[in-house]
Image: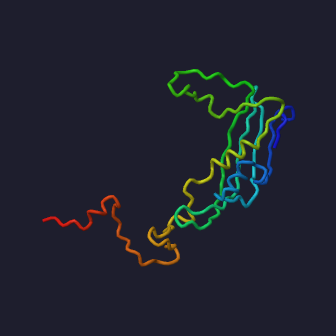
Amino acid sequence: MKIIIDRIPEEGLDLVFDEKPESFPVLNEIEASGECVFPEPIHNELTVSRVRDMVSVKGTVETRVRIPCARCLEDTELPLKKRLNIYFTRNMPELEGPTTKDGVEIRDEVIGLAPFEGEAIELDEVIQEQVVISLPSRPLCRAECKGLCPRCGADLNREPCDCDTTRYNEQFAALKDLKLK
């Protein structure tokens, strides 16, 4: 989705549109790796406005993801929704502040800024980034998911297994039969 700066009215521009996940290279890469599937289009509701020499883009990016549960590995479908609040600018401020061996400390006023050149802003990369950021790191099919048995691999949500559930630290396994006098 491309926004031409000169076509943004003074009162701002409200955009509501859907994009197919296939139109985003990183999302295609994630799907190809088998990590997850995006079964629905990415729904965007954005407000674009000019703020001095910057362009403000605010709103929400949302879709659904089918991803394996971190405990039982069953596919689960979860909603993804991310608020977007970014300012595009042609003139990024110079970073100032105390320097460290790792680089320059970032000031608060730089966070939320994105550079652009020319007469248009391409939103695809920003939308793609918001979807990736909103992916859960440990997705669960449900909060009470029991997961898989660590010994036999049985899905404990479906059936209990007969494995010994006594837990002990494997580092001290050699000491389990030690008899002290």
Which residue is nearer to you in this view: 162 or 67? 162
Which residue is nearer to you in this view: 151 or 159? 151
Q: Which image quadrant is residue 175 in?
A: bottom left
- Outermost left residue: 181
Percent across and percent down for residue 38 are: 71, 58
Depicted 49 relative to depicted 107: above or below: below
Percent across and percent down for residue 84 are: 68, 43
Percent across and percent down for residue 101 are: 50, 25
* Colour basis: rainbow
* Number of marks present in the image shown: 0
Percent across and percent down for residue 132 are: 65, 49
Which residue is nearer to you in this view: 87 or 71? 71
Q: Residue at x 66, y 52 (%)?
A: 81
Q: Residue at x 74, y 59 (%)?
A: 40
Depicted 79 relative to depicted 94: above or below: below
In-image side of 175 versus 83 (left or right): left
In-image side of 88 versus 174 (left or right): right
Which residue is nearer to you in this view: 174 or 147? 174
Q: Quadrant of the C terminus?
A: bottom left
In-image side of 4 versus 158 (left or right): right
- Outermost right residue: 7
Q: Quadrant of the N terminus?
A: top right
Q: Residue at x 52, y 28 (%)?
A: 102
